Image: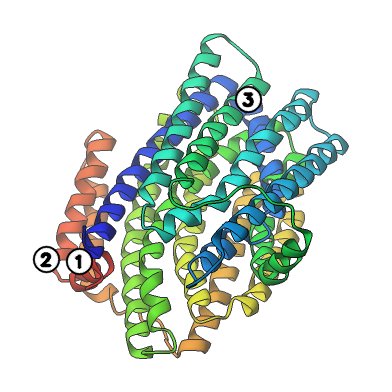
Amino acid sequence: MSLSRRIFYNTLVQTLGKVLAVAIGLTTISLLTQYLREKGFGGYSTVIAFLSLFSVMADLGLYLYVVREISRPGADTEKILSNSFGLRLVGAIATLCIGAFASLLFPYDPIVKEAMFIGIAAYVFTSVNQVFVGIFQKHLVQHLVVITEGTGRAVNLLLVYLFIRRNLSLPYFILALVLGNGVNFFLTFFLAKRYEKFGIAFDLKEWKKILYLSWPLAFSVILNLVYFKTDTIILSIFHSQEAVGIYSLPYKILETLLAFPAMFVGLVMPLLSYHAFATWDRFRRYLQRSFDALLLIDILMVITTLFFARQIVDLLKGQQNYYDSPRLLQILIFAAGTIFMGTLFGYAVVAINKQKEMIKGYLLGAVVGLILYFALIPKFSYWGAAIGTVVTEITVASFAYYLVRQGSGQKISLRILVPASPGIAILLLFYWLVKLPWIPEIILGCMIYTGALILFKAVPAQFINEVIFRE
C-alpha cells in the first residue's frame, strides 16, 4: 500500500473510530447521569478529576519522548521502550497512591474515598498504556489504537449497563472503568509487541537520562492539567456533590469534543514540522489554512450548541434534574472552541521548537485559573468554574499564538469570515426560523452550512487534499 493510501486509510479509520468512541462515551455518560443522579455523578466526577490530576503528574512527558526517540534513525527502541515502561509504571503507582491517600483529607463522602482507591488501577492502566501509543504512530497503524480504545470503552459501557441493572453503588462504576481500561491496555500491549521488541526495565541511569530529556514536556503536561481539572476539584471542596454533578455533565460533553481538534491537528503536524525553519512561507500557509478550517468548525459547533444546549443535555440526563447544566454548556462551549484553536497553536509551538518557552504559558494559565477558581467558585459555584475555564483557555491559547507569531512571523488572518459569512447567516436563520425535531434539524443545518461554505468557496479543498494525501 502506498504511503498516501496508508495515511488516508489511517485518517478514515481514526475519524470513524473517534465518532464511535464519542457515541459510546456519551451513552456511558447518559447512563451514569440518569442512574447516579446529581450527587452520585458528582462523586463519580470528583474521583475522575482527582485521579486524573495525579495520573498526569506521573506522565513525565514520556509519550512525546517515546514518539520522538524511537523515530530517530538507529535508535535503540527496545531500551527506550522498556525503560519508559518501567519508569511510567513506578511513577503512576506511586503518584496515584499518594493521590488516593490525599483524598482522605478532603470533605468527601466515605463512598467517594473508597472509590478513589479502586480507581488507582484504572489510571495506572491508562498511564502505562500511553507509552506504547507512539509505536503505532511510528508504524502508521494508529487505527489499531482506535480499535483498542473503542474496545475498552465498549467494555466499560457494557459493565455500566449491567451494574445499573443490578442496582449497584458508585464504587462498582469505578470498577467498570478499571476493567475497561485494563482491556484497552492489554490489547495495546500485545499489538505493540508485533511491531517492536520491549520488556520492562528498571535501569536508574537510563531513567535519569529520560527525565533529563523529557522534563520540559512533563512540566507542560502537568501545568496543562492543573488548570484543566482543578475547577472540578475546587468545586467539590466548596460545594456539594450535586453541584459537581450539575457542572460535570456539560464538562463531559466538552471533553468528548476535544478528540477532534487533536486528531485534525495531528494530521497537520507533520506538514508544520517539515516546513518549519525550511520553508517558512509554506509553514505559514499551512498554519493559516488549519486555523481557517478549525474556525469554520468552531462556528458551527458554537452556534449549534447555543441553540440546542437544552435538548443535548436532556438527551443525556433523561428525567433527572441537572437544572443549570444546559446554560453551563452554553458557556463551556466557548472554552471548547478556544481549545480547538489552542490545540493548533500548541502543536505549532512544538514544530517551531518553542516548547520550553510555552512552559511560561502553561504556568500563566495555571496561575490565572487557580486565582479565578478560588475567587469565583466559593461565591458563584459552578458559574464561577465555567467562567474561569473560558478565561483560562483564552489565556493559554493567546500565549501559544504569541509564541508562534514571534517564531514564524505569521499573523493569523480572519479573512476566511468574508466568504464564510453567507453560510453563517444562513445557518443562523435556519435554526431561528425552522422548527423540526432537533436532531434532524441539526443534521440538516450542518449540511446546509457545509453546502454554503463550498458554494461560496470558503472550504480550502486543496489544503484538505494536501493534509490527507500529503500531495
Residue 102 coordinates in the image, percent (x, y): 84, 41
Looking at the picture, which amino acid does disc 3 mark? Leu
Q: Name the residue nearer the viewer: 353 or 141.
A: 141
Give me the residue at 65% from left, 56% from top: 84
Residue 455's tag is 2
**How far is the residue under mark 3 from the one under mark 1?**
50 Å
Q: Nearer the viewer, residue 270 or 429?
A: 270
Q: In whole angstroms, how far apart are the C-alphas of marks 3 and 2?
A: 51 Å
Upstream in sequence: badge 3 or badge 2: 3
Q: In which quadrant of the rendered image does the C terminus lie? A: bottom left
Q: Earlier in the sequence, mark 1 or mark 2?
A: 1
Q: Residue furthest right?
A: 105
- Cα gap from disc 1 to disc 2, whole angstroms: 10 Å
Residue 261 % position (x, y): 41, 59
* Identity of the residue furthest to the top in this view: 166
Residue at x 36% of width, y 52% of height? 141
Task: Give the secondary structure at mark 2.
Answer: helix
Q: Are marks 1 and 2 in contact (CB under 8 Å)?
A: yes
Determine whether 462 is above or below 130 in the image: below
Tell me the kind of residue under disc 2.
Leu
On screen, residue 447 above or below 35? below
Residue type pointed to by label 1 = Pro
For the residues labelled 3 and 1, say whether their Cβ atoms are less than 8 Å apart: no
Q: Which residue is mark 1?
A: 422
The residue tagged 3 is 175
Q: Residues within 10 Å of mark 3 (few under 14, many from 20)?
A: many
